[in-house]
Amino acid sequence: MDVLYFAWVRERIGLPKERVDTDAATVSALVDELRAREDRYAAAFADLSALRVAVDQELTDFDASIAGAREVAFFPPMTGG
């Protein structure tokens, strides 16, 4: 699946997007796999309360299933006016 990173998440990881092969069943399990890769991922996912997630372009929670998903995107909460 494609994993997309936006704003400061992208800056910490150093990539806007990557292809990830995973056996994770949920977003949370995917995050655990990513955190274990390198320190830059651990830093980006250190505080999940500061992140939002979308699976196949639909906002969801970290306990959501990613079975059959084509894309998971991580980004900070939206602000502005």
Image: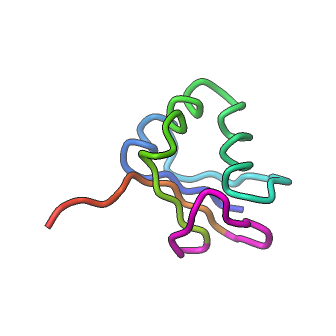
Residue in view at x 71 percent, y 31 percent = 36
From the top left corner, tell me how far across and down residue 53 is, in percent.
Answer: 52, 60
Q: Considering depth in this image, is 39 or 60 the residue closer to the camera?
A: 60
**Residue 65 located within the stretch drawn in magenta:** yes
Q: Nearer the viewer, residue 23 or 20?
A: 23
> What residue occupies the far left of the structure in this picture?
81
Q: Locate residue 65 relative to residue 46 in the image: left or right.
A: right
* The C terminus lies in quadrant: bottom left
Viewer-nearest residue: 80 or 3: 80
* Residue 78 coordinates in the image, percent (x, y): 31, 60
Indicate whether 53 appears above or below 37.
below
Q: Quadrant of residue 10 in the image?
A: top left
Residue 39 lies, in percent from the top left, at 59, 24
Please determine whether, in this image, residue 21 is positioned above or below residue 47: below
- Dominant secondary-structure state across the stretch colored magenta: loop
Position of the N terminus by quadrant: bottom right
For the image, the number of numbered tags is 0
Give the colour scheme of this rendering: rainbow
Q: Which residues are magenta?
A: 56-70
Q: Residue at x 70, y 40 (%)?
A: 32
Closer to us: 39 or 81: 81
Residue in the image at 67% along x and 65% along y: 64
